[in-house]
């Protein structure tokens, strides 16, 4: 039998650690065979050595998250307990992405996502392949917003190829902007979660944030910009070369896509797959491959992806 205590800075932190109506505490007790109680401003742990050390590590990681984010979510507790279930030590909290919007805290939630964010921060050009829901677009947009608000860049350019997923949108009513809006909606949805509506409108009216189909990139040089090409598996080899050569001074590019969801005509080679083969050894280029383990949407999404892979 081993006993240990963990100091708690104040009663409010104890409430956050234990969760609403002690929800976090109950889930930790169910997952870790250690006795947990609170007394005299401390969390008291008792049980065999392995269980006490597991519980101690979990609470310490939760404290770190509270210090940086001001709260600890159910998802954070889930991730910590999942690590315990796999007999892995709980990971240290990953550096969050500073988007500076009240109530918004964005943090990589898997080791693959953490590697992706680190690659973006340290390379001028990053390719990322991964399944739906693995955070390819969301984390790239979040890192771009962070760079903009920290003054590292002056402009965000969000780009997508105008290729339909088995449907022809050419007969839809409306002008060109109305027709291309469906392609760009996912990028706008992501950035809308990280920026206040009025600020987003101002950024777009002042051309600080630009969204455009890939065809509009020809002939441009993008200086001091953070450029994101989404759904890049639907580019041709020629389109990819054109896009990559738009990179200007003091700029970054992130190129992401899902190699299993190519909507190009038959026998057309994907520019994303081609570029990753050609540029794998080029200095300044990083390649990240996310997997089903990085899917952070509804848990059912991972099971759907796995079923289709089989």
Image (cartoon, rainbow, N blue to C red):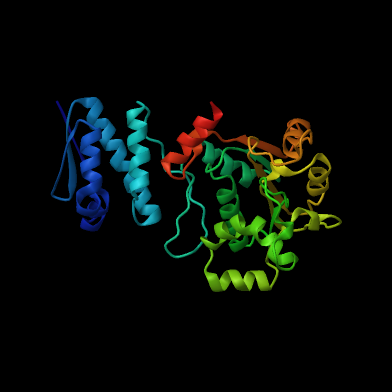
Q: Residue most toward the front? A: 171
> Residue 58: percent from the left, percent from the top?
31, 39
> Residue 82: percent from the left, percent from the top?
35, 34
Q: Is residue 231 visible?
A: yes
Task: Say which of 218 and 61 sits in front.
Answer: 218
Looking at the rendered structure, the number of numbered marks drawn on it comes to 0
**Taking 289 as reference, is 243 left or right?**
right
Q: Is residue 132 above or below residue 138?
A: above
**Taking 264 as reference, is 111 left or right?**
left
Q: Quadrant of residue 77?
A: top left
Q: Is residue 4 above or below residue 231?
A: above
Split into 4 quadrants, where in the image is the N terminus? top left
Task: Say which of 2 and 264 sits in front.
Answer: 264
Q: Is residue 154 visible?
A: no
**Taking 298 as reference, is 85 left or right?**
left
Q: Is residue 227 above or below residue 109?
A: below
Q: Quadrant of residue 232?
A: top right
Q: Residue most toward the right? A: 219
Q: Is residue 271 above or below residue 17?
A: above
Q: What residue sits 47% from the left and 48% below the top?
A: 107
**Taking 95 as reference, is 186 left or right?**
right
> Residue 27: percent from the left, percent from the top?
24, 40
> Residue 217: percent from the left, percent from the top?
80, 56
């Amino acid at each position: 039998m081993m006993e240990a205590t963990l100091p708690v800075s104040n009663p409010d932190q104890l409430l956050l650690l234990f969760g609403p109506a002690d929800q976090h505490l109950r889930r930790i007790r169910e997952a870790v065979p250690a006795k947990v109680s609170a007394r005299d401003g401390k969390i008291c742990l008792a049980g065999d050595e392995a269980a006490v050390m597991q519980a101690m590590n979990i609470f310490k990681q939760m404290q770190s998250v509270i210090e940086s984010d001001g709260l600890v979510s159910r998802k954070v507790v889930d991730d910590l307990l999942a690590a315990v279930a796999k007999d892995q030590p709980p990971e240290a909290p990953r550096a969050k992405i500073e988007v500076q919007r009240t109530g918004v805290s964005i943090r990589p939630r898997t080791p693959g996502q953490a590697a992706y964010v680190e690659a973006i921060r340290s390379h001028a050009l990053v390719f990322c392949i991964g399944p739906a829901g693995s955070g390819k677009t969301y984390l790239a947009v979040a890192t771009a917003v962070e760079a903009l608000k920290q003054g590292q860049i002056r402009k965000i350019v969000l780009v997508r190829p105008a290729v339909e997923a088995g449907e022809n949108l050419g007969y839809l009513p409306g002008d060109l902007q109305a027709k291309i809006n469906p392609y760009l909606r996912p990028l706008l949805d992501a950035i809308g979660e990280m920026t206040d509506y009025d600020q987003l409108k101002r950024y777009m009216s002042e051309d600080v944030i630009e969204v455009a189909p890939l065809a509009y990139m020809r002939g441009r040089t993008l200086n001091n910009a953070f450029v994101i090409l989404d759904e890049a598996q639907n580019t041709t080899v020629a389109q990819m070369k054109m896009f990559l050569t738009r990179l200007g001074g003091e700029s970054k590019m992130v190129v992401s896509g899902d190699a299993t969801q190519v909507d190009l005509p038959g026998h057309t080679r994907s520019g994303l797959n081609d570029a990753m083969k050609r540029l794998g050894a080029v200095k300044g280029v990083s390649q990240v491959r996310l997997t089903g383990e990085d899917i952070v949407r509804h848990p059912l999404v991972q099971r759907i992806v796995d079923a289709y892979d089989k």
